[in-house]
């Protein structure tokens, strides 16, 4: 009897799997175990002093891993020049991350709800130290921004009206050296988690500038506006009519993570 029970169970199982409905159930199980296809995610490139592309920052990668884990969407991350990333996203080839709104972009892109709000500071070099406290203090100035960047709706309304915009390369060190060379009056820079001008200046002096390992910048002092001159919001976005289901899933993840407090903690490492 002890040997016949397993044999009977095997015969019963073989008979069961040939029942008409079982094939569908087995296929469903098989499909559910397959990895979901990855969604292309475009990210802004950053270059070192030699013009070589830097890897994705660890803290930024942690944010993206959080969204993958919480949303169930898996990303195929592509780091590209920002203008090219925007063009490919506009062509419906993927989702773009770290995107801010502008009137033109709203005509072409479907945006997620805000992931985070950024403070945009005005950075200058040399004496006398300017007393910049608002956008109006930028009037008539030449303002340096990253190529393909926007710093929000207020910035878009003011650029080339209140001030002249120059777009610079993706090399952060090169942008600071351009400011030193007086080829621009002001550089706009998002310093994320810091609240006061003095904190931002200390961050530039003690962390950011030394990280470039550029002798031309070593020991140089840059001034920061007393207050942020713009505020911007950062989003996921995709071409209108594309990836709308994924964007809505990401919206749910943002709302849930914000309500639980988990998302702000992850964002604080980078933003």
Image (cartoon, grey):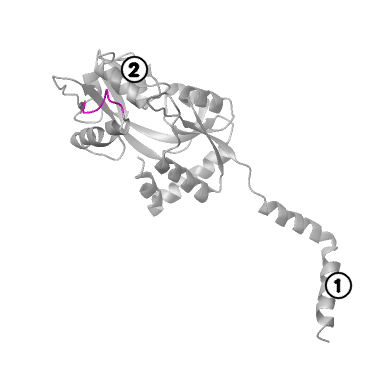
Q: Give the residue pinned by disc 1.
A: 11
Q: Residue at 32% across / 19% down in the picture?
A: 144
Q: Residue 167's x, y, as percent?
A: 38, 18
Q: Residue at 40% across / 52% down in the picture?
A: 262
Q: CA distance from mark 1 to mark 2?
A: 77 Å
Q: In the orientation shown, which residue stands out farthest toward the front? A: 215
Q: In the orientation shown, which residue stands out farthest toward the left? A: 128
Q: Horizontal placement of 84 versus 228: left or right?
A: right
Question: Considering depth in this image, is 164 or 64 the residue closer to the camera?
Answer: 64
User: Which picture quadrant has residue 190?
Assistant: top left
User: Which picture quadrant has residue 165?
Assistant: top left
Q: Residue 247's x, y, as percent?
A: 53, 39
With respect to residue 192, does 53 lie above or below? above
With respect to residue 253, does 164 lie above or below? above
Q: Horizontal placement of 77 versus 15: left or right?
A: left
- Label of residue 159 in the image: 2
Q: Horizontal placement of 94 versus 144: left or right?
A: right
Residue count near mark 2 (Cα–Cα under 10 Å), binned few <14, some 14–19, many ≥20: some
Question: Considering depth in this image, is 98 or 4 the residue closer to the camera?
Answer: 4
Q: In the orientation shown, which residue stands out farthest toward the bottom? A: 1
SS of the residue under disc 2: loop
Q: Does the magenta-highlighted stretch encompass residue 92?
A: no
Position of the C terminus, as image quadrant, is top left
Q: Residue 112's x, y, as percent?
A: 47, 37
Highlighted magenta segment, given as a residue range: 214-220
Position of the N terminus, as image quadrant, is bottom right
Q: Mark 1 vs mark 2: which is more N-terminal? A: 1
Q: Residue 10's x, y, as percent?
A: 82, 72
- Label of residue 136 in the image: none
Frontmost of labels 1 and 2 is 1
């Amino acid at each position: 009897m002890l040997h016949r029970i397993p044999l009977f169970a095997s015969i019963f199982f073989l008979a069961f799997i040939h029942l008409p409905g079982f094939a569908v159930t087995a296929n469903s199980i098989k499909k559910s175990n397959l990895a979901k296809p990855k969604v292309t995610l475009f990210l802004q490139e950053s270059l070192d002093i030699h013009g070589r592309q830097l890897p994705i920052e660890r803290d930024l990668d942690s944010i993206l891993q959080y969204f993958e884990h919480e949303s169930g969407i898996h990303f195929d991350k592509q780091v590209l020049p920002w203008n090219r990333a925007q063009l490919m996203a506009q062509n419906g080839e993927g989702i773009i991350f770290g995107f801010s709104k502008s009137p033109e972009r709203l005509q072409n892109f479907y945006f997620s709800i805000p992931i985070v709000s950024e403070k945009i500071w005005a950075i200058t070099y040399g004496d006398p130290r300017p007393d910049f406290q608002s956008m109006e203090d930028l009037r008539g100035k030449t303002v340096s921004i990253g190529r393909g960047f926007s710093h929000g709706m207020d910035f878009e309304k003011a650029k080339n009206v209140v001030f002249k915009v120059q777009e610079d390369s993706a090399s952060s060190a090169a942008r600071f050296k351009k400011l030193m060379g007086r080829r621009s009056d002001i550089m706009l820079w998002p310093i994320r988690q810091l609240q006061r001008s003095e904190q931002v200046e200390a961050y530039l002096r003690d962390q950011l500038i030394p990280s470039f390992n550029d002798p031309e910048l070593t020991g140089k002092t840059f001034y920061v506006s007393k207050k942020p001159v713009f505020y911007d919001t950062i989003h996921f976005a995709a071409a209108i009519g594309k990836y709308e289901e994924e964007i809505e899933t990401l919206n749910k993840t943002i709302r849930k993570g914000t309500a639980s407090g988990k998302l702000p903690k992850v964002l604080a490492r980078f933003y």
